[in-house]
Amino acid sequence: MSTKQEDIDVSVWRGDPHSGNYENFKVPAQESQTILDVISWIQQNQDATLSYRFACRVGMCGSCAMMVNGIPRWTCRTHLNKVLNGNKLVVAPLRNLPVIKDLVTDMDPFFDKWIAAEGLHHPSKTRLDPIEEIEPKSIGRVEIDTGIECINCSICYAACDTVTNNSDYLGPAALQRAWTVYNDVKDADKQTVLDAVSGDGGCLNCHSQGSCSVHCPNDLNPMNAIAGLKRATVASLFSRKG
Amino acid sequence: MIRPHRKHSLWLAYILHRISGFCLAVFLPFHFYLLALALTEPDRLDGFLSWTDTPIVKLAEFGLVFLLAVHFFGGLRLMALEFFPWSTSQKTLAALAIASAFLVATIFFLQVI
Amino acid sequence: MNIRLYVLQRITALIMAPLTLGHIAVMIYAVQDGLSASEILGRTQGSIIWFLFYGTFVVAVSIHAAIGVRVIVSETFKFVGFTLDAFAWFVLLAMLFMGGRAVLAVTLL
């Protein structure tokens, strides 16, 4: 911020699951101020009833994502001067998820789909077997590397219009998780993963709009992961027939 | 108004592909109907075809060829993304698809006028 | 979108890719001296090659368009289940009928 004493106009969504509206606040601008700082300042100085969610404040936990001037962002790592529109800031709860109160969304659909996409480990060994060695430069392991830094912040899920238009769609994060499991040589049940991601709400619904990859705060590329699942799904169809 | 989270080239490529595809699907029945006139009423077909000499129809034809070309190149881009793991430069491909479509439509346009 | 529709959508797209190029080339060539019924028929009538070319095109585009429009109405207008399938089948059959009639008109009959 150029001048420290300047106030910024902040519109914050207030409401419950059924209705709501934007409420305006004046917040003093400070140097190196994040969106989460702004929201916290309002809650501590203007309206103690403002509800929002955060935990780690350093971009690890994935709990503070909100819509900031229309774009889903991790608010703890987003500097105000990067997103300020003139002197205005609009903060709203994440898209595509039900609102509980104010800026807090119900993340259940997001995590339910995470489970539905079968993004969990299917063991291939017992505790008596030696640990399998994974070559860090192997193709599958390199592919996994592009997806495992996901912090479950749901920004991609909020950015995805296919999720908006199709409530059954599993969404970018869950599918990317499934892609990392699919590429894990230690996973014993890849067909279960493929079956889970190729149904009616699965990877084939993706229109490659790319908003997931554009807005991912960790620069992951769920769109590419979903393309990988599409290839695997089609390949398994032909190999099963043939 | 395009919402902020959609303001990037891949989303624009998506909406262009969807709109062009939809418009082509709406256009095709008319196209088929006109051509079938060759069988039933060739005079009426000729009446329509002479109408295509007017500038406004020529411009509309330019639009149609552009729709076809942009859906064609956009579709190739999508299939490259889906079938080949190497396509990381999607933005470039999206831009290339639109540029190629313009080129094809313009060549067509220069032939009609 | 299930796997059957997804694969059909891509296969018809791949079939149409060279056909579309051919069609655009024909268009650019054909419009050079203006269009007339006799000019079109003179090029295409009685030609088994053009019948196969445009016949394949019509079948592929009917499947491709029906699946594409199906996705659009399901996402935009929230059609589901029987309504959605019936709509897609209607688009497919209508386009096959009209397209087939047009191809027959300019090539064989």
Image: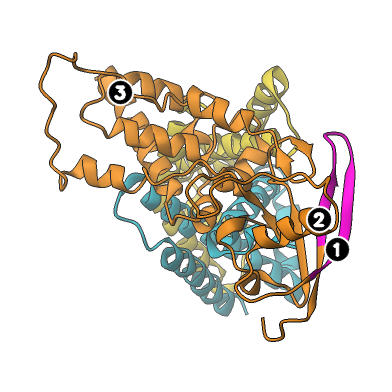
Chain colours: A orange, B cyan, C yellow
Distance from Cα at disc 2 to Cα at disc 3: 44 Å
Extreme front residue here?
A: A45
Q: Is residue B1 above or below residue A44?
A: below
Name the residue rendered at 66%, 44% in the picture.
A53
Question: CB under 8 Å between callouts 2 and 1?
Answer: yes
**Dot 1 amino acid type:** Phe
Task: Give the mark nearest the N terminus, 2 or 1.
Answer: 2
**Dot 2 amino acid type:** Val
Q: Which mark is residue A25?
A: 1
In screen coordinates, is B56 left or right of A183? Answer: right
Magenta stretch: residue A12 in it?
Answer: yes
Name the residue rendered at 15%, 48% in the picture.
A137
Task: Give the mark nearest the N terminus, 2 or 3.
Answer: 2
Same subunit: marks 2 and 1: yes
Q: Is residue A182 above or below residue B61?
A: above
Name the residue rendered at 51%, 76% in the picture.
B107
User: Which chain letter goes with mark 3?
Assistant: A
**Dot 3 amino acid type:** Lys
- Range drawn in magenta: A11-27
What secondary structure prevails in the magenta region?
A: strand
Residue C39 in view: no
Name the residue rendered at 78%, 80% in the picture.
A6
| Neighbour tally class for label 2: few under 14, some 14-19, many 20 plus, Cα within 10 Å | many
User: Which chain letter goes with mark 2?
Assistant: A
What residue is shown with label 2?
A12
